[in-house]
Image (cartoon, rainbow, N blue to C red):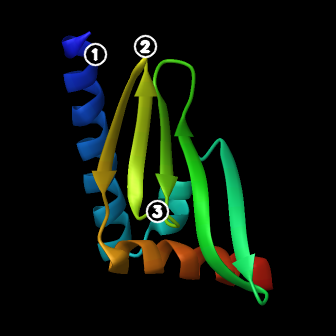
Amino acid sequence: MTENRNELAEMLKSYDMDLRAAIQNNTLDEFMESALEVQTVKINDEVAGVRVLLAFGGPNIWLDTDLLELRGYWAGQEEHLPLMSDECAEVNAYFDYLAEE
């Protein structure tokens, strides 16, 4: 079980690095192309948070800007990796922009 948990933690770190790179390189749209599901939380017609399913079935990986974290679930194990609030704000702004189009 510990092996799965360590591997899951490494996956979350990898997704975090990819997310940071996408924000820095202005390629968030490319990063989000692989999203399997997006759940949007809105308050007064503005995006307050999003939950993006990034991987499913082998582990399940969620990007959750409402909780400011990446969450992973695999073989009964659960891991959380905190995200920077500015990263989450960028993701929220991205989905807010998409909702306006």
In the depicted structure, whether residue 60 falls above or below residue 19? above
Q: Secondary structure at mark 2?
A: loop
Q: Position of residue 40 (x, y in %)?
A: 70, 65
- Pointer 1 residue: 4
For this view, does 34 lie left or right of residue 45?
A: left
Which residue: 73% across, 77% down? 42
Kindly identify the amino acid type of the residue bearing the numbered disc 1.
Answer: Asn
In the depicted structure, whether residue 82 falls above or below residue 76? below
Q: Position of residue 24 (x, y in %)?
A: 30, 75
| Residue 20 showing in the rendered view | yes
- Pointer 3 residue: 67
Q: Secondary structure at mark 1?
A: helix
Q: Quadrant of residue 94?
A: bottom right
Q: Are marks 1 and 2 in contact (CB under 8 Å)?
A: yes
Q: Are marks 1 and 3 in contact (CB under 8 Å)?
A: no
Q: How far apart, in angstroms, are the residues tagged by discs 1 and 3?
A: 23 Å
Circle 2: is it few (<14), some (14-19), or many (20+) Cα within 10 Å? few
Which residue: 45% across, 79% down? 90
The foreground one among 31 and 78 is 78
For this view, does 7 lie left or right of residue 51?
A: left
| Residue 101 showing in the rendered view | no
In the depicted structure, whether residue 73 falls above or below residue 48? above
- Classify the position of the N terminus by image quarter: top left
Q: Which is nearer the N-term, disc 1 or disc 3? A: 1
Which residue: 32% across, 63% down? 83
Q: What number is the disc on residue 75?
A: 2
Q: Are marks 2 and 3 in contact (CB under 8 Å)?
A: no
Kindly identify the amino acid type of the residue bearing the numbered disc 3.
Answer: Leu
Q: Quadrant of residue 48?
A: bottom right
Kindly identify the amino acid type of the residue bearing the numbered disc 2.
Answer: Ala
Q: Which is nearer the N-term, disc 2 or disc 3? A: 3
